[in-house]
Image: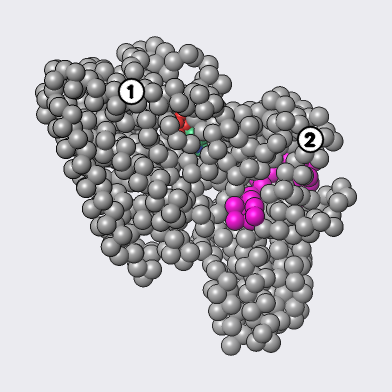
Amino acid sequence: MDLTTDKKLWMYRKMYEIRCFELEVDRLFKANMIWGTCHLSVGEEATAVGAIAALEADDMITSTHRGHGHCIAKGGKLPQMFAELLGRETGYCRGRGGSMHIADIDTGNLGANGIVGGGIPIATGAALASKMKKDGRVTLCFFGDGANNEGVFHESLNIASLWKLPVVYICENNLYGMSVAFSRSTAVKNVADRAAAYDMPGEIVDGNDVEAVYHVVKKAVERARRGEGPSLIEAKTYRWLGHSKSDANVYRTKEEIEEWKEKCPIKRYRLKLVQEKIATDEELDRIEKEVEKEIRDAIEYAKNSPEPSVDDIANGVYA
Amino acid sequence: MAEKLYIDALREGLREEMQRDQSVFLLGEDIGIYGGAFGVTRGLIDEFGEERVVDTPISEQAITGIAVGAAVAGMRPVVEIMFFDFLTLSMDQLINQGAKIRYMFGGKAKVPMVIRAPMGCGTGAAAQHSQSFPGVFAHFPGLKVVIPSTPHDVKGLIKAAIRDDNPVVFAEHKLLYRVKGEVPEEDYVLPLGKADIKRKGRDITIVAGSIMVIRALEAAKELEKEGIDVEVIDPRTLKPLDMRTIIDSVKKTGRVLIVEDDPLSFGWGAEVAAGIAGSEAFDYLDAPVKRLGGLDIPIPYNPNLERHAVPQVENIVEAVRELLR
Ligand SMILES: Cc1ncc(C[n+]2csc(CCOP(=O)(O)OP(=O)(O)O)c2C)c(N)n1
């Protein structure tokens, strides 16, 4: 279960990729090049990357409205992602879906979701399909702390446990729904405490420690793959930016935000990699430079891509 | 009279009803300090406190059912569902419970609640945050459905909805929040079930609801330049539906175009069209009844596609020209 050097560097790269992607989206949004709304995961990179690092390539995920990081970690391609956000025909959803609906079935990403909790039964259903087909795949289901109060969360976890489905539920607890603090929305102290109600393992992990997330998820994924049923993991983390574009952060303090910025998962991992002599600063700098170029190229690709044609507007509703 | 934004007029209506009646309270996600996703309830928590402006967990079905229960037990809850799309999560409590309780229980209970939500596209929010389907709710006996189009109407109708003893679905098009209009200073309540003639005209009747009233009025201005005199009727409530006003208008003009924001197939416009066809107005028709509505597709993200997904001013202008050809 030990992480190879390659995997560690991959995790660093992916976290940095997500960070750059999100900050560029923020910039493009402010420049009016991105339409609609989007939810950025700056500060939460370690959870997406650590969890997905524990999967095999053909395992599946379901994602959330804050889903860019999940998509990138699962192998989503930056050009197609930017193209989608710019509403282009070359985007993942051919410009029809936008930020909240990026899906990439080829890499096992069953989609971001505009409905809070909407992915939870879908992940459960994907796991049911794997069990029926005996294909050995595991589905990793991301959701936020806000989603743990939707009925489908409870209904799905009960069924998954009852039927011993190969699914791992991972809650990214960033301490707030939109503006409502976790302690004001949820009757238990930890989302993981709810695992007991469905007779499955419940684990809490530091969501800003990418290796810790990896190890906890890996254990749950292996258990699921052995046919022993689902687990519920709660990664405690924090979103640095507002909930979405229209958020003035009136519900939390600057001090709290600054405190969490100190716990930056990327800076922290960089220190660890250097201290443990897994990589030198120069090597990590090189990775960052490569990522920055990929991001620039991806944005160029998106900008130069065609818009969808209105003639096709009604195509694709039915199979 | 003062000019006010739709959103401010709506908030004023809520505030006045909360001042007037202690049993009125608000329930919804992020409606407290955040003021709701669109700012409708902004500031109300300062005035009425957390007891009457209640931030809930993200649990639409429970929130809706809790409103039903509180209403049966004597309160007057006003629920905000953050986007109209999420009313699908409220459906069981609203339709199987709230709408039916009075009749099922032999008239021994009442359910005085309002469930309000912002609907509609035009903000790039894509398929799960852009739908308009108030017509769906009009299908269910026991519910009332309101689709206010102006600041004046939204204030008078929210008050009527709150005072009504039945569950009312209150659909606010999000592009209307920033629309300005005259709002009287005095306390006024508009009746549910009374259409409003938004513009008088001789040549053709446009029946339009919600945001489409604004577009129909703009189209009417364009058409005026061509010498076409358009009458615009806003039903204001889909249930009860004031067919009388519509029928009288069609008898006068002999032509009718119905414009809605809901997807066209099985939309409420079909109900209006059938009402006209089955009435004495049928004999006065000089052209077939025409309808415009949303395309039968999920709302796309790309702004140009999105624009084409629902009727715009130019589509209304074109349809009127066709009808008069
Ligand atoms: C069913 C539903 N209700 C409400 C919303 C509006 N909404 C979008 S994100 C959000 C907060 C979600 O909080 P959480 O699950 O903790 O995820 P986070 O945004 O913190 O990542 C809300 C209320 C929605 N999209 N879907």
Q: Inspect the magenta stretch and tell me whether residue A184 lies in it.
A: no
Nearer the observer: mark 2 or 1; the answer is 1
| Pointers 2 and 1 in contact (C-beta within 8 Å) | no
Percent across and percent down for residue B200 are 77, 74
Q: Is residue B31 left or right of residue A52?
A: right
What residue is at 67 percent from the left and 70 percent from the top? B217
The magenta stretch spans which residues?
A: B157-178
Label 1 crowding class (10 Å Cα cut-off): few <14, some 14-19, many 20+? many
Q: In 3D space, how far apart are the residues under numbered discs 2 and 1 (Cα atoms)? A: 45 Å
Relative image position of residue A249 (x, y in whole percent):
54, 34
- The amino acid on which the numbered mark 1 sits, given as a three-letter code, is Asn
Residue B265 in the image, given as x and y percentages of width and height: 50, 61
Q: Name the residue beneath numbered marker 1.
A: A208
Q: Quadrant of the C terminus of chain A?
A: bottom left
Residue A99 is tagged as none
Query: Is residue B182 found left or right of A272 in the rendered image?
Result: right
Residue A313, above or below A270 = below
Q: Residue at x 42, y 30 (%)?
A: A239
Quadrant where the N terminus of chain A is found in the figure? top left
As shown in the figure, which amino acid type bears the numbered disc 2?
Met
Of residues B268 and B220, the one drawn nearer to the viewer in this rendering = B220
* Residue at x 66% of width, y 47% of height: B170
SS at mark 2 in the image = helix
| Residue A194 seen anywhere in this rendered image of the structure | no
The chosen color scheme is one colour
Q: Specify the label residue B18 is tagged with.
A: 2
Q: Quadrant of residue B284?
A: bottom right
Pick the front one: B73 or A27:
A27
Residue B179: image x %, image y %? 67, 58
Q: Nearer the viewer, residue B264 or A298?
A: A298
**Residue drawn at (79%, 50%) of the image:** B156
